[in-house]
Amino acid sequence: MCLAIPARVVELLDGDNARIDLGGVKKEISLALVEDVVVGDYVIVHVGYALSRLDAEEAERTLALFAEAGIGGAGAGA
Amino acid sequence: MKYVDEFRDGGLAQKLASAIRAEVDPARKYAFMEFCGGHTHAISRYGVTDLLPANVRMIHGPGCPVCVLPIGRIDMAIGLALARPDVIVCTYGDCLRVPASDGLSMLKAKARGADIRMVYSAADAVALAQANPTREVVFFAIGFETTTPPTALVIRQAEALGLNNFSVICNHVLTPSAIVTILESPEVREIGSVPLDGFIGPAHVSTIIGSRPYAFFAEEYRKPVVIAGFEPLDVMQAVRMLIRQVNEGRAEVENEFTRAVTEDGNLKAQALVSEVFELRRSFEWRGLREVPYSALRIRARFAAFDAEAKFDIAYRSVADNKACECGAILRGVKKPTDCRIFGTVCTPENPMGSCMVSSEGACAAHYNYGRFRDIPVVAA
Amino acid sequence: MGEVKKGYVRPLDLKHGRVDMGHGAGGRAMAQLIDEVFARAFANEWLGQGNDGAVLPAPAAGERLVMATDAHVVSPLFFPGGDIGCLSVHGTINDVAVMGARPLYLAASFILEEGFALAELVRIVESMAAAAREAGVPVVTGDTKVVEAGKGDGVFISTTGVGALPAGRDIGGANARAGDVVIVSGSIGDHGTAILSQRESLAFDTEIVSDTAALHGLIAHLLEMVPGIRVMRDPTRGGLATTLNEIAVQSGVGISLEEAAIPVHPQVEAACEFLGLDPLYVANEGKLVVICAAADADAAVLALRSHPLGAEAARIGEVIDDPNHFVQIRTGFGGRRMVDWLSGEQLPRIC
C-alpha cells in the first residue's frame, strides 16, 4: 500500500515543515517523523509527511545491481 | 523525477527479465505473494507479468487498507455524519467510494447532505477543526503502519493545541498479523494446496517497522521474504532474489529496498505510535474475518480524541455478498476470474467486495489493467 | 467607463457591486447589467440590436450546419492559464471545429449567483470577449438569470456554437479503421493539473498552466494539408483515455498505444505522482486527438507541428481489430496493460 514518493528537500521551514521538489512541482510537507534532514536530502513522502530519508549511495548500488543483471551470471543478491 | 524514473527504465527491465529467465528452474513452478496493494498496483500498471516467465506466478495479497476495511466501519462514519449535521467527517480519497450498507457510500451520503470531505493529509483534518470551532471534526483514519504515524502526530498536535472539537475513528491495521493469517489459513498450511513460495514485503510499511519483524515468518514458516521498493524494477529484482532463495533452499529476510529501509526502521515514528495507540485484541478484516492483535485503537490517555468513545458509536458487522470470493482471493487461494460475479455483477462501478473497491485490490487491478488477457485479442 | 444611458439613475458599481435578484428580474436592473457588462464587452452588430434572437445569414450552397453546446461549471473560476469565461468560448468552438466545420457564431447564457462580485463578472466577460475576438467567432445572443445565494457556484456559463461544414466532409468518432494511426497534438493533462493545483486541500506549486485554447485555426491548417483525416476529437473531462475509449466503441475497433510516445509535461507527471492520478485520465482543454490512415500519418504530424498550438504533436498508437473495443498500452517499462474507462471521479489516492 502507501503511495509514497521520493522528493528533494529544497527549503526548511518553521515548525518541522519543509518545502520539497519533485520533478519541478513543489509542496510543503512535514518533517516531524524524521530527524537530521538537511536541504538537498531526498525523503520519502506519504500523505504530506516525510517517512524516511533516502540513502543516495544505496540507491546507486541498487541501480548498479539492475544494470549488471543479464550480463552472464549476475552478482549475488543484496 | 530522480529516484523514480531510473527505477522504471525499460532497458534495465529487459536485463532483469533475462536474468530471471536464466535463474528459474524450468522444472518447477514459483508462486510469490506481494502483500502490499501498492505492489499489486505497480505490477498491473506496468504490465510486469509480461516480463516474467510463465512458471512464476504473482499472487495478490491483502495489503490494501481500503480493501480490508469492513463495511461496518464505514457505516459508523456515514451514520455519524448523517445523524449529526454539526459533524464534519473527513478522510482520504480512497474511502469515499467504498459501498457500505443501505446502498450508501461516503460520497453518496455526501449527496444526501452529510458533511463528508476529502483530505490529502491528516494535518488537513486538524486544520479543519481549527478553522471550524463550532463544528465537530472527525477524521476517519485508515492505513497500515505507513499511515499510522501521521495520525499519531495529529492527535498529539490536537492535544497540544487544546482542541476539543477534533477526534479520530481509528481503523489502522498491522501488516505482520495479516501475513500470519494468510500463512495460518488451512489452504496454505496444507502441503500442496496453495504453493506459496515466498513474500514480497511491503515497501513503505517497512521504512517504518524495519526489516526485523519479518524474520519471524521466514523462520517459523520457512518462507523467504524480500522487502521490495515500489517501482517495477524493484519488484522484478525482488522476484529474482526470491527465486534464488527458493532454488537454494533458503528462507531468509532480504532487503531490496536498501535505499529506504533499515533493520530498525523509523524509531521516532514507532515511538510516537506506541505513545498514542495500543493493540486491539481482535479486529475484523473484510475477507479474512477476525484477526487477533491486528489493529490499533487510541489509548485511554487520548480518549478525548477517540471518536468511537466520544460519540458512542457502536460497530455492527456486515456480511459480504454470498457469491463474493474475496476471502479466498485475499488468501491467494483463488483468482479474480474464479469468482462467479467478477466483471458481471461486480465491477469497479458497482463493487460487491473488498477486492474490487480500490484500484489496488486484486480484482480491480485485474479488471482495470489486465482483463484483456482473459480474452484473446489480435496482437498490435 | 462609458456615459450612463438614459433611464439608469447611476452606472453599475463594477468595482464593489454584487449581483442581486433584481439583475435577473427582467426589468431595468437586468437591462442595465446586460448593457453595461455584456453588450459593452461583446460589442457586435447583433447584440447592439437588442433583439431576442440574432438574424444570421444562411450557409453557402452545399454547406451543412454543425451545432454544439457545452455547460461550464469549473471551480475555481480563475486558474493559471485561463478562467471560466475563455474556457466556455474555447470549448464550444472546439466542439464545432473537430467536426470539420468552420465555427461561425456563439450564444452564451449565464446563471449568476446572488452576491457574486460584479468585478469578477466583468473580468470573466471581458475574458470571453477577448477569446471570441481572437477566434473571430462573435457572441451574437445571450441570456442571464440570477439564482438565490447558495444555489449556484458564483457563475455557470453555457455556450452554444454553430459552424458551417463543407460539402463532402465527414469527420466523426465512428470512422476509425484498423490500421489507422492515432495522433495527439501535444502534451496531455495540463488543464486538469492546473485546476487541481488551485484546490486548497491539495496545494502544490507548479508552473503548469491550463492549455485552454481555440483549436479551429490548427484544425483548418491540418485539414488543408491532410484532407483525408477521418476522426478528430478534443479530449476534455476524463482525459485522453476517455476520448479513445469513446472512439473505440463508436468505431467498433481496438486501440493500441505506446506510452513512451505520449507527450506529458514533466511537472504534470510529477503532480500526478503526488496525487496518485494517471495523466491519461486528466482533463485537457486545448488538445486534439487525430486518427487518420497510416499513409497520411507523417503529413498530419508535420502539419500539426508547423502550427504553434501543435508544436509537440506526436504519433501515439494505432487502431487494431478488436471485438471487445479495448484500449491497451505498451508501458515504457515494456509490459502491456489496459487503459480502461474511468470509474467514478478520479480522487487522489493514498495507496
Image (cartoon, coloured by chain):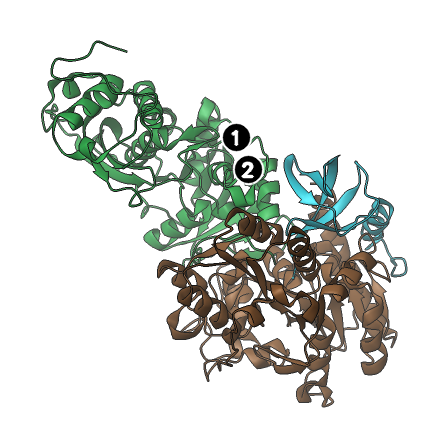
Chain colours: A cyan, B brown, C green
- Residue lying at the far top of the rendered structure: C3
Front-lying residue, C190 or B173: B173
Q: Residue at x 68, y 83 (%)?
A: B194
The secondary structure type at the circle numbered 2 is loop
- Residue lying at the far right of the rendered structure: A76
Q: On the same chain: label 2 and label 1?
A: yes
Front-lying residue, C312 or C202: C202
For residue C263, the mark is: 2
Rendered position, B56 above or below C3: below
Q: Residue at x 50, y 49 (%)?
A: B132
Q: Residue at x 33, y 46 (%)?
A: C173
Q: Which residue is mark 1?
A: C312
Asked if one can make out residue C14 in the rendered structure from this viewpoint, the answer is yes
Question: Mark 2 or mark 1, which has the lower sequence index?
Answer: 2
Asked if one can make out residue B67 in the rendered structure from this viewpoint, the answer is no
Circle 2: residue type: Pro
Dots 2, 1 in contact, CB < 8 A: yes
